[in-house]
Each structure stands twice: as C-alpha cells, then as structure tokens.
C-alpha cells in the first residue's frame, strides 16, 4: 500500500525516532568580572592595587598564554594556527582521525577574533585637573585558544578561551556524540551517522539517554576540564569567589526520524511539497541539494516549484 500523506509515512514507516540536543554552545564566564565597576573592584579591593588599570591585565594574559603553550609542549599536543576562511570542524575531523586515545586533548587551535575587552582611558578630575585612569568597555581583535578534546562520556567537544582579561570562554558540545558514548558504555549495539544515529538495538534506552543530558552533567564536564587545563586565575582568585559559571548562548535540538526504505524518503518530500502548494501556502518551495555552493560555483542547484498566479487548472 502506497502512503497517501506525510502523516501516513510518519505513522507507518518510521523505524527510529529520537528527540535530542544536537549542538549546544555555552558562555563560560566569571559573573563578578563582567562590568567596569567589577574590574576596578577586583584589582583595587581583591588584589590591593591602588589605581585599577587595564595595564594590570597584561601580565595575567602573558602568564596564561605561557601556561597554555607549555601545556601543549609538555603533552606533545599539536598547535594549529587557523587560516582565514578555514572550517575549524574540518581541522578537528582531520586530527580526530589520527587520535587513538579514549580521552584527551586532540589539538589546540589559535585564531584572532573580535571580542569585548576592558581598556583604560585617561580622564581629568574636574576640580583639580589631575589625570586619572578609568576602565571602560570596548572591543578588540584578540588571540583565542581553541582546545579541541575528546571526553570519555561526551565525545568530541571544544573549549575556546579568550587570552585577554577577564578570559571569557565558550564551550561547544554535541548531544549526538554524547548519546553514542553512552550507548557504547552500556554495550548497546547501534549504527552511527556523522551527526546522529541510524539504528539502535534499544531505542527506548537511547531516548532516555538523550532526555537525561542535564545541565548538571554539562556543568560537570566543564569543571572536569577546567581542573585539567591551565587556568587563567590563581587559587587565591578562585577562593575569593572569582569562578567560572555557564549560560546557554545557542542551543540546537533535533528530531531524528529514520524511514524503513529510501522510497518512503522520496515520497515524504514529494508529499511535503504537494501539501504546501494550495491556497494560503508559500508562493515558492525549494529543495536545496547537499553540495557546497560558493560565489564561484556556476549556475543554480535547486529544485524550485512556483505557485504564483495559479489559474486553478491542473
């Protein structure tokens, strides 16, 4: 029997359906160091500097970069300077193919990126005319270190550090890679896709694994690797409450539905197009083929169905 609608296909021909986090990008930052006043307090009250100034951050930046470079040398970790326009995920895939450990840092990448920073400008006391330094928020091109690693429970991820005070960072992880690792730990047979799962011997357990990927587990991943990697703040800073926290910057979620036969996949897209061509629907529907198109690629590569000014005739 041929499926007559999208609903028929999804009801009768889906052999695996999984909802999960796909990709998650998180802010990693010290909450007490995100304003001009907080920076002044850090240096004046915590570190005992009478004149808070951005100049005080330079030694901290140099020390942090030195520790990162020494860490890479000591553990024989490749250090890569990213080229302009280069896809960082492609660089990671290349190094990952040569990485044989169950857990560890794969490589460290460097890139200059624009980021918010704090700098010092000179101001004058209106009463005395004496100059004094004043911390203001600005932006600058700053070196960032991308630490690409593999975690035993989460699989591949990266932690990106800005090398300029207050050393804000980003954590990026993949929920599908987490699910694959958890299935392997449990000894459950599955067939992996590049970014997903094609088949699983225990779909219910797979869904439970995806549902149980919680904020506490992500936070534990961050704490684990902050303890292993060079840290920009001293123990005294952290004991005084200058510790990293995390928040969600971007979250992508996926619904993976695997059909039983390729022909049902073709029917699915045909029905989707057909069911979106009647009155009140979009005037144009396009299917974009899976190929890379740049400004130098000749021609157009898409299927386009135009429904403007329909006459009602079939």
Image (tube, helix red, strand yellow):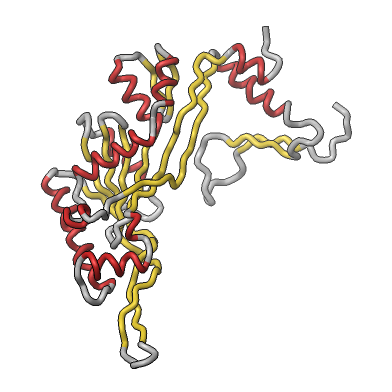
Quadrant of the image containing the C terminus: top right
229 sits to left or right of 153 = left
Measuring 54% from the left and 46% from the top, which residue is drawn there? 297
* Residue 219, placed above or below residue 111: above
Residue 257 seen by the camera: yes
In this view of the protein, which residue sits in the foreground, 22 or 209? 209
* Residue 308, placed above or below residue 6: below
Quadrant of the image containing the N terminus: top right
In this view of the protein, which residue sits in the foreground, 285 or 276? 276
85 sits to left or right of 187 = right
Residue 231 picture location, percent across and down: 21, 51
* Number of marks in picture: 0
Residue 262 picture location, percent across and down: 55, 17
Measuring 61% from the left and 18% from the top, which residue is drawn there? 10
* Residue 303, placed above or below residue 210: below
Residue 214 picture location, percent across and down: 39, 32
Residue 35 picture location, percent across and down: 38, 64
Residue 106 seen by the camera: no
18 sits to left or right of 84 = right
Instruction: Give residue 105's quadrant in the image.
Output: top left
Instruction: Give residue 127's quadrant in the image.
Output: bottom left
Measuring 28% from the left and 49% from the top, which residue is drawn there? 109
Measuring 33% from the left and 64% from the top, which residue is drawn there? 38
In this view of the protein, which residue sits in the foreground, 112 or 84? 112
Q: Residue furthest left?
A: 74
Q: Residue furthest bottom?
A: 128
């Amino acid at each position: 029997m041929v499926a007559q609608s999208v609903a028929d296909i999804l009801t009768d021909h889906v052999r695996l359906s999984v909802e999960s986090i796909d990709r998650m990008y998180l802010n990693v930052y010290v909450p007490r160091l995100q304003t001009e006043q907080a920076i002044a307090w850090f240096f004046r009250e915590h570190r005992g500097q009478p004149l808070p100034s951005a100049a005080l951050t330079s030694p901290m930046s140099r020390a942090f970069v030195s520790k990162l470079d020494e860490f890479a040398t000591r553990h024989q970790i490749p250090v890569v300077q990213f080229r302009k326009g280069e896809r960082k995920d492609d660089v990671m895939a290349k190094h990952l193919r040569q990485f044989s450990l169950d857990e560890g840092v794969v490589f460290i990448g460097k890139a200059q990126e624009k980021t918010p920073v704090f700098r010092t400008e000179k101001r004058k006391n209106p009463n005395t005319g004496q100059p004094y330094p004043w911390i203001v928020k600005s932006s600058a091109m700053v070196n960032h270190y991308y630490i690409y690693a593999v975690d035993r429970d989460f699989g591949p991820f990266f932690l990106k550090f800005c090398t300029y005070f207050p050393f804000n960072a980003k954590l990026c992880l993949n929920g599908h890679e987490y699910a694959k690792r958890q299935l392997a730990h449990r000894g459950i047979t599955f067939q992996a896709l590049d970014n997903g799962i094609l088949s699983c011997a225990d779909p219910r357990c797979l869904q439970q694994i995806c549902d149980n990927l919680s904020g506490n587990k992500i936070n534990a991943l961050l704490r684990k690797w902050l303890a292993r990697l060079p840290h920009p703040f001293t123990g005294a800073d952290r004991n005084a409450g200058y510790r990293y926290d995390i928040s969600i910057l971007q979250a992508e979620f996926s619904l993976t539905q695997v059909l039983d036969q390729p022909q049902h996949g073709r029917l699915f897209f045909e029905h989707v197009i057909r069911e979106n061509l009647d009155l009140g629907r979009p005037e144009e529907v396009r299917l974009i083929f899976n190929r890379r198109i740049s400004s130098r690629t000749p021609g157009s590569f898409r299927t386009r169905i135009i429904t403007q000014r329909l006459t009602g005739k079939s």
